[in-house]
Amino acid sequence: MGSLTTVGALLIAILAHTAYKSYIAPPHVPSPYEHFFSESYYDARALFRASARAANAQLHAIPYPIESMDLTIDVAIQPGTSPSSLVIHLSGTHGVEGFAGSAIQSALLSNASFTSAAHDPTIVFVHAVNPFGFAKLRRFNEHNVDLNRNHLTPEEFAAARARDPNHAGYVDISHMLNPSVADDVSFWTSALYSIAKYGFVACKRAIVSGTYHNPRGIFYGGHEMEPSHRLLHEFFATHFDLAAITRAAIVDIHTGLGPPGMDTITTQKADALEIIAPDALHASNDDGALSGYDHVQGRGHVGYARTWFNPETTQTVTFEQEFGTVSALVVLRGMRLENAAFNHAPHARLVAAQELRDVFYLHEDSAWKESVVRRGATALVNLAAHFRAVLP
């Protein structure tokens, strides 16, 4: 009886925690930032292109190799005063999360005071790193690969496949993460069991560390570098003299974890946060939104930095800026539901995809939209304006 009471109490605690952390949108208040947000990848791309043209930015469209869908990775370049300084701003690495990053990019390109300023670094906006996921409202790409677990060398892929599939506990909870049929009852009961058995942080670490063995699993890192990364490597090698760059920064925009509308930033230069986003949450906090990520490998922006720039001649810094939406368990439920439909029930995928969109993009919440654009744009404006303070 005592054990049942304990389990019941734990269930109530988890559900209460989830309800508390979930976000209830306030009454709608018109915001001048709403028009930077779109309701589809294609609308977002059109707005990005129009904003780039209006800003007289150099605009490029990289065709993505799925001919039936008219997909592109779009790049807008704002030349700076120093040919040796570069800032790269990424949106849509995780597909459906791209609505926020796209809005930030379009807002910045529409800001005349920003686009006309004589910035030291050249600013490069990369729109929709994962255009398939953005268009299809899924976090992963057409091969079910998580691009933020995929930027590895052939040797690193081989090592990942040779490693124990359960090194971070992924196999232990795979039944909860990757069912063939996803429903709320099975999710909450299996989540309760897993958290009770292994602990919340251990489960989170197991999930985000991902898998290189289960191609239908969530957070699958793949077995080779995916087209998005290869296309961007080719583009930057063709359009920039990367060997001449002495200072480079990369900002990658995400949504999902953390307090609604607030940004949590991961960076290897903690002192830089005081310059670009002094009130952002730091991901190094043990209880922060991005705690438990210590086993994660293959992040795209980190891979770009180490591949494109010589550490002996180039100072680099990367920032992963994640804007909170709803509770972590609700986010996980959405990913699990959409992935089950994608792999096992295509007829049900659209409804599941729309639910997934709603956990990564609070499209009915004007306050959330305003916070995301304000905070995201401010961080990049500060980075460009104080670039030599960030990378002295």
Image: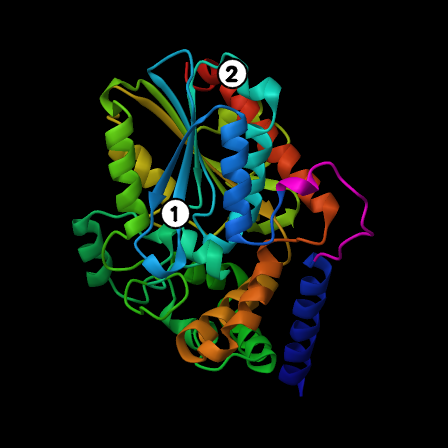
Q: In the figure, is residue 306 to the left or right of 192?
A: left
- Which contiguous range is marked in magenta? 23-36
Q: Quadrant of residue 243 in the image?
A: top left
The question of residue 13 being in magenta is answered with: no
Q: Where is residue 387 in the image (x, y as percent from the top left)?
A: 47, 17
**113 vs 383, nearest the viewer:** 113
Which numbered disc, 2 or 1, marks the residue closer to the eye? 1
Which label belongs to residue 72?
1
Q: How many marks?
A: 2
Q: What element carries label 2?
A: loop
- The residue wearing badge 2 is 386
Q: Position of residue 13 (x, y in %)?
A: 69, 68
Question: Dividing the image into 4 quarters, which one contains the C terminus?
Answer: top left
Q: Where is residue 11 in the image (x, y as percent from the top left)?
A: 66, 74
Residue 266: tell me if it is visible.
yes
Q: Residue at x 25, y 22 (%)?
A: 241
Kindly identify the amino acid type of the residue bearing the numbered disc 1: Thr
Tell me the CA gap for discs 2 and 1: 32 Å
Q: Residue at x 44, y 28 (%)?
A: 269
